[in-house]
Amino acid sequence: MILFLDFDGVLHGWSQPAFQQVPRIDALLRDHPDLEVVVTSSWRHSETLEQLAAHFAPELRPRFVGVTPNSRGAQSYTRYHEILDYLEANGQDEWYALDDCAAFFPPGCPRLLLCDAARGYDAATDKVLRRWLKRAGV
């Protein structure tokens, strides 16, 4: 199972200190050892995968397996199309996405867990994702 991960508005709310929610993501990854992470954040344009993963606990960094490619010209739902491109290129189809921008995904996307941009990946969002992962057998 892949978790497609945005940074701004997820790992920290817009008015919070940077990476405030990382310990919550670290705990999620520890509890779900089969979950791999692919970064969808625009940070992927300025940092390497190694630099992106360095924000997380050292033992979890190997689980950061990639970044999404740039969209191939999709005019709408850009991040969703980047995710589909990544999945197709890597022969995978089980995934969820954490993001704070609904406009990057088709309305009602069942694999998107939308975070409140002001709070990021908070306790309520964590509870929902854990329920989804349990239902998926992860």
Image (cartoon, rainbow, N blue to C red):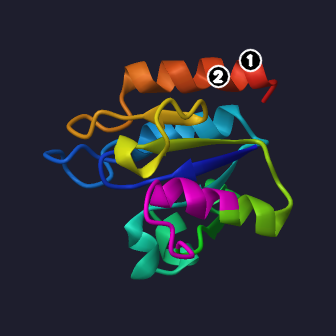
- The residue at the point 78 percent across, 30 percent down is 138
Between 72 and 94, the one lying in front of the other is 72
- The residue at the point 53 percent across, 72 percent down is 71
**Image quadrant where residue 76 sits:** bottom left
- The residue at the point 53 percent across, 36 percent down is 112
Answer whether residue 55 is visible to the viewer in this image: yes
Residue designated by label 1: 135
Residue 110 in the figure: left or right of residue 40 = right
Q: Residues within 10 Å of mark 1 (few under 14, many from 20)?
A: few
Between 117 and 32, the one lying in front of the other is 117
Answer whether residue 57 is visible to the viewer in this image: no
Verify CB contact (< 8 Å) between mark 2 and mark 1. yes
Residue 8, horizontal then vertical, whole percent: 31, 54
- The residue at the point 51 percent across, 67 percent down is 74
Residue 54, numbered circle: none
Residue 42 in the figure: left or right of residue 74 = left
Question: How far is disc 2 from disc 1 in space, using C-alphas?
Answer: 5 Å
Placement of the N terminus among the 4 image quadrants: top right
Residue 113, horizontal then vertical, whole percent: 49, 33
* Amino acid beneath label 2: Trp
Q: Is residue 44 magenta?
A: no
Residue 61 in the figure: left or right of residue 51 = right
Q: 82 above or below 14?
A: below
Residue designated by label 2: 132
Q: Is residue 83 magenta?
A: yes
Label 2 element class: helix
Q: Which residues are magenta?
A: 71-84
Q: Residues within 10 Å of mark 2 (few under 14, many from 20)?
A: some
Label 1 element class: helix
* Amino acid beneath label 1: Arg
